[in-house]
Image (tube, rainbow, N blue to C red):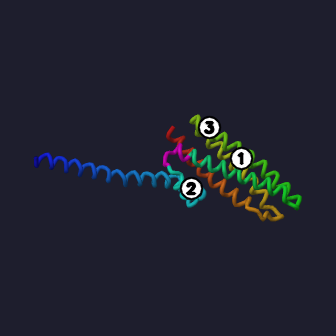
């Protein structure tokens, strides 16, 4: 009887040691993945905040999460640009806002294509589409920095989209390395 009690206690101790030992290693690997990604982005602190809210550390899951986030922010910014077109009184700003709306429309298409590429396992395609979206957004940002000054949130939103796309680029490159 004493030996079976000893075995039961020994098994419990082994199980506790096993699960306690695994939890910190798992948490460390989650932090390592986020750290590996974020230190390569253009805005690491933004990246950490975004990826901590993703709810996953799987690279494909992170790619899906950030592509969806980029798509939502692009759509929001496109709607803002369209709204600004109708409200602008300065003809130069009106023209820039209209051009930005078109560029954000193209960026939305790029992000959608990137989602499709991810689903097909075409990580190079994801990289190319995220880069194309960044270029579209960057072109809009370049145009609205010219006088007359743009008083809207268009510039801030554009920088956020570029930061998200920067994360997507790093994740796509990591996925390429694993393919």
SS at mark 3 in the image: helix
Q: Residue at x 42, y 51 (%)?
A: 29
Residue positioned most to the front: 1
Q: Which mark is residue 170?
A: none
Q: Which residue is mark 1?
A: 107
Mark 1 touches mark 2? (CB < 8 Å): no
Image quadrant of residue 172?
top right
Picture coordinates of residue 137, whole percent (x, y): 72, 52
Q: Residue at x 58, y 44 (%)?
A: 64
Mark 2 touches mark 3? (CB < 8 Å): no
How packed is label 3: few (under 14 Cα within 10 Å), some, or many (20 or more)? Answer: some
Q: Is residue 158 above or below residue 172?
A: below
How far is disc 2 from disc 3 in space, using C-alphas?
22 Å
How far is disc 3 from disc 1 in space, using C-alphas?
15 Å
Q: Which mark is residue 50?
A: 2
Instruction: Give the mark nearest the N terminus, 1 or 2.
Output: 2
How packed is label 2: few (under 14 Cα within 10 Å), some, or many (20 or more)? Answer: some
Q: Residue at x 62, y 47 (%)?
A: 68
> Mark 1 against mark 2, which lies toward the viewer?
2
How far is disc 1 from disc 2 in space, using C-alphas?
20 Å
Instruction: Give the mark nearest the N terminus, 2 or 3.
Output: 2
Picture coordinates of residue 129, whole percent (x, y): 66, 43
- Position of residue 157 in the picture relative to residue 149 (left or right): left
Asked if residue 59 lies in the magenta stretch, the reply is yes
Q: Write down the region rendered in magenta.
A: 56-62
Instruction: Give the mark nearest the N terminus, 3 or 1.
Output: 1
| Closer-to-camera residue (27/121) | 27
Residue positioned most to the top: 120
Q: Which residue is mark 3?
A: 117
- Position of residue 56 in the picture relative to residue 118 (left or right): left
Picture coordinates of residue 31, whole percent (x, y): 46, 55
Asked if residue 43 lies in the magenta stretch, the reply is no
């Amino acid at each position: 009887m004493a030996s079976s009690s000893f075995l039961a206690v020994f098994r419990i101790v082994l199980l506790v040691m096993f699960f306690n030992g695994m939890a910190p290693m798992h948490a460390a690997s989650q932090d390592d993945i986020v750290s590996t990604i974020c230190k390569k982005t253009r805005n690491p602190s933004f990246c950490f905040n975004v990826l901590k809210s993703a709810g996953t550390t799987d690279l494909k899951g992170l790619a899906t999460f950030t592509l969806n986030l980029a798509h939502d922010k692009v759509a929001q910014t496109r709607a803002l640009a369209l709204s600004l077109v109708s409200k602008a009184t300065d003809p130069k700003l009106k023209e820039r806002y209209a051009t930005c709306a078109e560029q954000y429309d193209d960026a939305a298409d790029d992000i959608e294509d990137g989602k499709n590429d991810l689903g097909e396992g075409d990580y190079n395609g994801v990289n190319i589409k995220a880069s194309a979206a960044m270029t579209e957004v960057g072109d809009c940002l370049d145009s609205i920095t010219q006088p007359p000054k743009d008083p809207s949130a268009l510039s801030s939103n554009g920088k956020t989209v570029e930061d998200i796309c920067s994360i997507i680029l790093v994740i796509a490159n990591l996925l390429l390395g694993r393919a």
